[in-house]
């Protein structure tokens, strides 16, 4: 009997040590998680550019903040490479810089990763944004490809967060939506909790090598059930402009309407000459 009690005691000790080890490791990982609070190496290499989103009356509906990486070889800003998580602290500092001008912006969209929106600090971040800035409407954008790469547990966390973000000042967008059934099946669980779907217009170009499962018009009918509004992005030419006009798409974005511009130069930048 004594030996059995000793065995249970050691089981308890080992279990306690294992749990303690997991807690210490989790604390260390979150404390040192690059891309959430640690801004090391991010300050000068990355900046946010603003790109306008237009409505069907060709008036500016809002702006999207786009992360750009500086290429020292070309001396140009480009789409980031190998950046899985950019820091929430960088978003905070960016908003603080442009905050005085935000009173004239109806909607400001922020791109976030799956890792960021499911991080335990995300709720505090949203509380800060709504409580200390001039943002009238915050739109959180999550990339379809990022959701696709997430495992089933992360996708459940995303759904849980979407449910918690049902706030009058927060809207949710899923971007980079294409014409495939796989994408529809992937995203449909989120439909009751999102406001916008942003479509990549290049995914709807007909060709011999590209099969379109769901057209823009079919998407339009399906998501109308959930009162989801459409944004069509990456519009570059007059034919694409004509298509979104024909379909009466509420919102559109792309080089045909405006290029991303550096917000750090307000005298020449996106707020000054767009408003």
Image: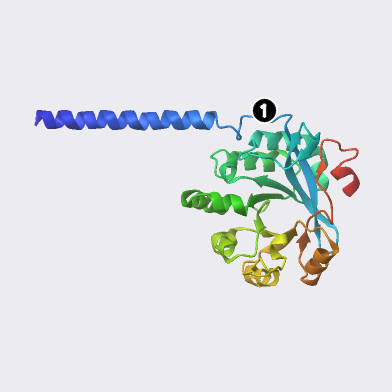
Query: Residue 256 vs residue 69: left or right?
Result: right
Q: Position of residue 69 (x, y in %)?
A: 73, 37
Q: Position of residue 18 (x, y in %)?
A: 34, 31
Q: Nearer the viewer, residue 145 or 1?
A: 145
Residue 145, placed above or below residue 92:
below
Q: Nearer the viewer, residue 177 or 269?
A: 177
Query: Residue 55 vs residue 137: left or right?
Result: right
Residue 62, placed above or below residue 221:
above
Q: Residues within 10 Å of mark 1 (few under 14, many from 20)?
A: few
Q: Quadrant of residue 242?
A: bottom right
Q: Position of residue 61 (x, y in %)?
A: 80, 55
Q: Residue furthest left?
A: 1
Query: Residue 51 vs residue 208: left or right?
Result: right
Q: Quadrant of residue 230?
A: bottom right
- Residue at the spot of label 1: 41
Q: Nearer the viewer, residue 10 or 143?
A: 143
Residue at the image position 57 percent from the left and 38 percent from the top = 121
Say what secondary structure mark 1 lies in. Answer: loop
Residue at the image position 82 percent from the left and 35 percent from the top = 264
Residue at the image position 70 percent from the left and 68 percent from the top = 207
Q: Is residue 275 visible?
A: no
Q: Nearer the viewer, residue 140 or 67?
A: 67
Q: Is residue 273 visible?
A: yes
């Amino acid at each position: 009997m004594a030996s059995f009690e000793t065995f249970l005691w050691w089981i308890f000790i080992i279990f306690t040590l294992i749990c303690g080890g997991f807690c210490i490791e989790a604390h260390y990982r979150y404390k040192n998680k690059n891309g959430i609070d640690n801004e090391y190496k991010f300050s000068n290499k990355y900046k946010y550019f603003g790109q306008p989103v237009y409505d069907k009356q060709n008036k500016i509906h809002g702006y999207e903040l786009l992360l750009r990486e500086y290429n020292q070889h070309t001396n140009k800003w480009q789409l980031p490479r190998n950046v899985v998580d950019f820091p929430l602290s960088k978003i905070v500092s960016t908003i603080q810089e442009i905050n005085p001008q935000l009173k004239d912006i109806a909607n400001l969209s922020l791109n976030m990763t799956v890792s960021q929106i499911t991080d335990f600090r995300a709720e505090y971040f949203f509380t800060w944004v709504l409580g200390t800035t001039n943002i009238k409407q915050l739109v959180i954008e999550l990339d379809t490809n990022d959701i696709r790469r997430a495992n089933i547990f992360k996708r459940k966390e995303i759904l849980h967060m979407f449910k918690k973000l049902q706030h009058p000042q927060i809207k949710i967008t899923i971007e980079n939506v294409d014409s495939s059934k796989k994408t529809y099946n992937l995203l449909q669980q989120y439909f009751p909790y999102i406001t916008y779907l942003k479509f990549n217009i290049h995914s709807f170009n007909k060709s011999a090598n590209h099969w379109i499962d769901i057209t823009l018009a079919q998407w339009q009918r399906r998501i109308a059930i959930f009162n989801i509004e459409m944004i069509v992005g990456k519009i570059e030419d007059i034919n694409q402009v004509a298509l979104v006009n024909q379909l009466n798409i509420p919102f559109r974005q792309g080089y045909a309407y405006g290029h991303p511009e550096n917000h750090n130069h307000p005298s020449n930048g996106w707020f000054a000459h767009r408003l």
